[in-house]
Image (cartoon, grey):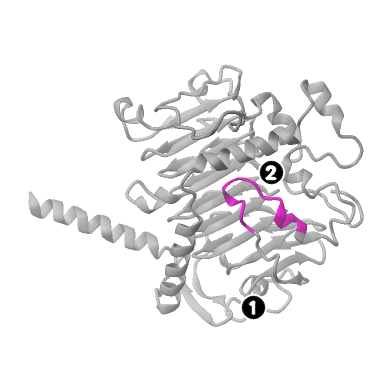
Amino acid sequence: MASNKLGLVLLLLGAVAVLAQANIAEYDEYWREREAKARKLAEEAYHPEPEEVTNEINMHVARAVEGFNSTRRQLAKYTGPCAATNPIDRCWRCRRNWQKERKRLAQCVQGFGRRTTGGARGRFYVVTDPSDSSLTDPKPGTLRHAVIQKGPLWIYFARDMVIRLQQELIMTSHKTIDGRGAQVHIAYGAGITVQYIHNVIIHGLKIHDIVVGQGGLIRDSVDHVGQRTQSDGDGISIFGSSNVWLDHLSMRNCQDGLIDVIMGSTAITISNSHFTHHNDVMLFGASDSYSGDQIMQVTVAFNHFGQGLVQRMPRCRWGFVHVVNNDYTHWLMYAIGGSKHPTIISQGNRFIAPNNNAAKEVTKRDYVTQDVWKHWTWRSEGDEMMNGAFFTTSGKPLQRRFGRGELITPKPGSYAKRLTRFAGALNCRPRVPC
């Protein structure tokens, strides 16, 4: 019996080691150092009192819609070509000179990714070439060349383009990919990999029809070329990374997931995005056996989960996930699920259930019986349930440590349609508010 237990422990440790080296065929000194640095930064980014962060974003939402008590009045507040309806967008969108003030965007993030600045402290880099012809010696002017450069960099695009990545795009720290001012598609090839890095903003892209990359030699920094195995076919994979903000993305139809947040990633915000036509939308947490995801903290805010979605919006393991003021208008199986006792706080979302009576429940617990999951903290506050939708809560209410008057209640789900009205990649033009 003892030998069987030892064998199981060794098997689990081996599985964790494989997970930690996912898609890295040669785990050399470069990748060991990159992982060690990323782990330390992730531990520093972890917030020991996550409800302070959830309370803060609720406060900003309340201020953004202050003084408008009815839906009709809310809709009438903003007129003309620009209507910024949530606190992130109100920070930058309706500024006529947004193009000359691109880096202002870095001041606007909310939620767990609130300290993300991306490439704000660096120079600008303009992508002029949509090709991806060399993986080991990327051509200057291409996106692959931009994302591996040393130091902070704010990357934007000279014109509309479709970028078909031959293999996964491996980024380095302190980068912003800013799609505003052009229609930029990452499509028909591999996706974007945020692996063992820190401080990244990805904004304003259309990411769709992503397929598995077969791997091979890929330059992953200015000074290193590494051997990669087959990639998973995710739109964006956040792996062992921290302070990452994904905003105003339009995503659909990837071979695996649209967004993965795994392997000890934390301080993540996913906001203002539009998701359609996909099965496994978001996976938060690598596996039930990887306890390193206990530090995972993710904010999912102001997104529209739209047509053709099936499940995992998100599906969570371990960690703390704040799902706030999103609009769930479609799902086929369930909206929010998980295993391995994640904490899930759902506030002010609108859930419109499908007509299928067997799929009305918003939530799904995997692999455990009720006597186990009843202790998991899954709370619903101010959510609007439509067409028979229902959220099965569990666990004790969180112990809020706020003084009198400091706790901000979330704006109810009736606001969700308004707050998410401009989700997805925007059609921003020079000298005109977005």
Mark 2 or mark 1: whose residue is earlier in sequence: 1
Percent x, y for residue 279? Answer: 54, 41
Under tag 2, what secondary structure? loop
Left or right placement of residue 30 versus residue 177 in this view = left
The single residue placed furthest to the left in the displayed view is 1
Residue 333 placed where, x, y %?
A: 50, 30
Residue annotated with mark 1: 138
Instruction: Report crowding for label 2: few under 14, some 14 to 19, many 20 or more residues within 10 A (C-alpha).
Output: many
Q: Is residue 52 above or below residue 186?
A: above
* Residue at point 41%, 26% (across, down): 394
Is residue 169 positioned above or below 293 on the image? below
Report the side of 275 relative to 316 (left or right). Answer: right
Q: Which residue is mark 2?
A: 272
Q: 253 or 26: which is nearer to us?
A: 26
- Disc 2 marks which amino acid? Asn
Q: Position of residue 222 (x, y in %)?
A: 59, 80
Rendered residue at 50%/53% (across/down): 266
- Amino acid residing under circle 1: Pro
* Total count of labels: 2
Q: CA distance from mark 2 to mark 1?
A: 31 Å
Q: Is residue 255 visible?
A: no
Residue 274, x across and y down, in percent: 68, 42
Q: Is residue 324 visible?
A: yes
Magenta stretch, residue numbers: 104-116
Extreme-front residue of the structure:
404
Residue drawn at x 88%, y 49% is: 433
Say if 231 sits above or below 423 in the image: below
